[in-house]
Image: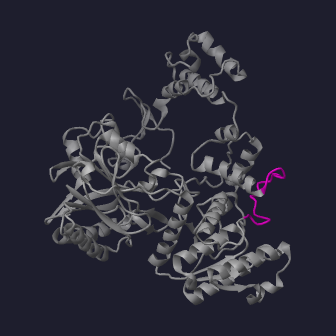
Amino acid sequence: MRIGIAQIDTRAGDLEATATRMVALSSAAAEQGADLLVFPMAALTGPLPVRESEQDDFLVDVMDVLVRLSEEVSCPCIVPVVGALDGQPAPEAVLVGDEKILPLKMQAYAQSEDAGLTDDEDAPAPDLPEFEFGGMRLGIAFTYEDLDDYDDFDLDVGAILYIAGYGYAADDVDSVLGSDLAENRYVADARTTGAWIVGVGSVGGYGTSVYSGSSFVLSPQGELVASLPSCEEGLVVAEVGGSSADDGDEVLPEVYNRPLYLWQTLVLGLRDYLHKIEQRSAVLVLDGSVGSMVVAALATDALGPTNVHAIVDVPGDVSREACCQRLARNLRIDVRDAGDMRAAAFVTRSEDALLRRGIVDAYLAAWAAEVGGVVLSGADKTALALGEKRLALEADALKPVGDVYRSDVLELMRMRNTISPVFPSTRLAADEAPEVGLDHASLSDEVWCAEVDQVLSDHIEYGRSMTEVAADLRDNELVEAVLARLDESEPWRVGRGLYLMVSTVTLFDARRPLGLAWHNRIRADREAASMLDRVTRRVGAGIGLSDLRGVSDLRGGSSSGKDARREPVAEERGDAAAPHGDARQVKDALSFLRDFSYGGGFRPKGFGEAHNAGQDGPTNGFEDSRGQTWPNPFSEN
């Protein structure tokens, strides 16, 4: 069977225009002998659902377009549609053609329900599609978890259509699809399942998410059979199901260069963001920071030099100001300097820097209104995380590098200079080393910046606790200072504008509840296990379960009442704590608390259920594992 991939950049929700392109692409694919054409997840509806109050009406229009596609496409097509389920994006794969429409995930769920498998925890996801087409059994995956199901369960499929649901993330090699097959998961998926893997990547900017394309086809042996480039549209048709040795010329995989790939993705995301909100020009300030200089170059690559306008303002640093002026000449962008801002001429003292920056942003906003463009900011992820310039008035509509750490911004500068040397300097400005209240005289500014960024990325992207980060970095003072600054900057991060999302965890994803008094600290090795043991014992005493045992009992200790009363005291002194890192003991201790978790044996009853009709409905409260109802101590508020 011949399967085609149409890697197209569209405007989300531009239903009729996108349908017209899909019909044309189906005709081109049919001419190349395609039996089935697969479109990317974001192509028709975009990657996110519309607001809840409009979902029904949007779905009606989407269905109308699917009917049109079923009648007009030249070959059967799989068109993803993204809706919402419990407030979360829920993609569906719709097979259209021959005047028929088949929602494949819905069909799979109905089949699982008929077989009584919807609640089977030892089975794959109940809506995981498997279907016969063209003499071959096909499966569809949208997520890594879907792929894991195909890896872990013996599912009889000849090919898996992986319609990637993730945007590009610089810290996730799997998100680059066919651009780094040597390092990511897909070759292993092909070999584990013994199935062909057809990876279909969205391409383009959809809101602040960026998709980089790089679609591919792998044989069951993990050999690359077909591929499409990154950050470009394309159409490819490949033979699937035969021998990969019969496919003719060898297809060479791309060589993944992370800084270059990130640069190209940011350029694509910036261009699409502006074009899809019907803007063509960008206005920015060159203030001497590496972020502002990189954004100027990104905007030039994305929009062309005639559509980029900059104000150079680096008060008090003649050398850095000259560097910015030279960069503007190298990029051939329209530039103004402080002499063009009459109001700024009266604000020259260093203590008035905040006021001057506000004046500059006011000029940027006025210039953007004049040329019909948007203001861009050079603030990076490090600046946003640490709350730099937190009180400054900002006119920007987008921070292109707001999800990129400063040390990575430096790497981008150096990579871009290997293409053409536009940056006169690729070093941090004199005052650009991250400030966290500690002296770093023994380290260069760049090394210090890299260490601060390492603390932030370990904690934010990789989800490591303060204790774990400190254990690796071996600098408790730095870790505490950086993460304290991250916490205290939260109120000033809210509302600081949009940024292109190019990481697995953005600062918004890692946000902290405003006004939270609790702050984390570096903890002793055995603190967690000791505390779990103490809590477990007291829970046992509180509900009178004589068979509830502590962590020390699991290690063979006494379970007598006398010892149970004495051992927690020893634990509090640290005399008999569980060894740090003993995950089995911690899990066993937590299992005793399971009945107190939401959904455990001791669970809320009546809250939020459809049949709960206020005073006339069932009694609100808690139901234990034996079915006994306990009164609820809390109001419904």
**Is 50 covered by the magenta stretch?**
no
Residue 126 lies, in percent from the top left, at 28, 43
Residue 499: which quarter of the image?
Answer: bottom right
Exactly how many numbered labels are in the figure? 0
Residue 234 lies, in percent from the top left, at 35, 68
Residue drawn at (51%, 24%), measured in percent from left and top? 588
Query: Which color scheme is applied?
Result: one colour
Residue drawn at (41%, 41%), measured in percent from left and top? 620
Describe residue 17's horizontal placement relative to residue 89 as left or right: left
The image shows residue 620, relative to residue 509, as above or below, that is above
Residue 573: which quarter of the image?
Answer: top right
Residue 323 lies, in percent from the top left, at 74, 75
**Is 435 covered by the magenta stretch?**
yes
Residue 71 lies, in percent from the top left, at 16, 70
The N terminus is located in which quarter?
Answer: bottom left
Residue toward you, 194 or 393: 194
Do we see residue 516 in this rendering?
A: no
The image shows residue 398, relative to residue 281, as above or below, that is above
Magenta stretch: give its range: 427-444
Prevailing secondary structure of the magenta residues: loop
Residue toward you, 608 or 404: 404
